[in-house]
Image: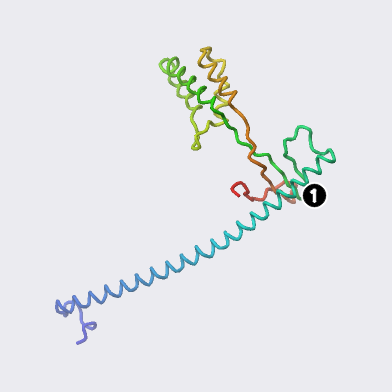
């Protein structure tokens, strides 16, 4: 009688082992087929999407160059015709005649602090540890949090501005001198210009198209 036609209790131990090996071999073959199919599909997905992403990235880079060139020319013309605001630092917007398309050039800056800030922070921390920590731990922790640096190792503008708003709370020379040094060390560095492309909706609202040039 064929082993495959026998019930389990009719099979000898050798026949059971042989049958188990056949089942395991079949399962391994099916697992291998599924693995091969999955990996082929994964490879196809990654390749197709990355090739399209690379093409989009290249086109976006070319487009960014065109935008910068045209908006630079526009800025010169605005200056020539006296249409650029006197207090403008390079930012402006232009709109088509139908008032349906608008492009904005936005000034992008980085707040930075020079080497004087390190001495200023040192003085402030020395004062806080010496005069504030023991009698007002909550306030100490709050003020210290404003001196925390970001992952790039820089002070954060918003936190520093909040710290400076507490200037009149203390009159210790270390506190005053530390804050003075931090203020004097601050400057704004121009990163460049960002651009926004906006379309007016039928409801009359401006809607921004998402095009991120910042990393290009």
Q: Residue lying farthest right? A: 81
Q: Name the residue at 45% across, 16% down.
A: 132
Point out the image quarter for the N terminus. bottom left
Decide which of 30, 105 is in the foreground and name it: 105
Q: Residue lying farthest front? A: 115
In this rendering, would 71 be left or right of 81?
left
- Using the image, determine if residue 35 lies above or below residue 100: below
In this rendering, would 174 be left or right of 214?
left
**Residue identifier under label 1:** 96
Q: Name the residue at 84% across, 38% down.
A: 82
Decide which of 167, 204 is in the foreground and name it: 167
Residue 2, quarter of picture = bottom left
- Image coordinates for residue 127, horizontal then vertical, percent: 47, 17
- Using the image, determine if residue 21 lies above or below residue 120: below
- Image coordinates for residue 116, horizontal then vertical, percent: 54, 24
- Image coordinates for residue 14, horizontal then vertical, percent: 15, 78
- Using the image, determine if residue 22 lies above or below residue 40: below
Q: Residue lying farthest bottom? A: 1
Q: Secondary structure at mark 1?
A: loop
- Image coordinates for residue 73, horizontal then vertical, percent: 77, 47
- Using the image, determine if residue 85 lies above or below residue 216: above
Decide which of 158, 86 is in the foreground and name it: 86
Decide which of 19, 95 is in the foreground and name it: 95
């Amino acid at each position: 009688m064929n082993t495959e036609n026998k019930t389990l209790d009719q099979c000898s131990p050798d026949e059971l082992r042989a049958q188990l090996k056949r089942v395991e071999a079949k399962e391994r073959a099916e697992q291998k087929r599924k693995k091969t199919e999955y990996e082929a599909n994964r490879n196809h997905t990654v390749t197709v999407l990355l090739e399209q992403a690379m093409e989009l990235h290249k086109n976006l880079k070319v487009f960014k160059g065109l935008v910068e060139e045209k908006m630079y020319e526009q800025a010169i013309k605005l200056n020539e015709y006296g249409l650029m605001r006197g207090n403008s630092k390079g930012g402006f917007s232009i709109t088509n005649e139908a008032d349906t398309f608008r492009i904005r050039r936005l000034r992008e800056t980085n707040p930075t602090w020079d080497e004087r800030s390190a001495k200023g922070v040192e003085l402030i921390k020395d004062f806080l540890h010496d005069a504030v920590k023991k009698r007002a731990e909550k306030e100490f922790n709050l003020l210290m949090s404003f001196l925390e640096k970001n992952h790039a190792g820089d002070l954060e503008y918003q936190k520093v501005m909040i710290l400076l708003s507490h200037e009149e709370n203390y009159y210790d020379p270390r506190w005053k001198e530390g804050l003075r040094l931090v203020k004097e060390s601050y400057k704004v560095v121009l990163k460049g210009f960002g651009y926004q492309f906006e379309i007016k909706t039928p409801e009359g609202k401006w809607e921004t198209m998402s095009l991120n040039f910042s990393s290009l």
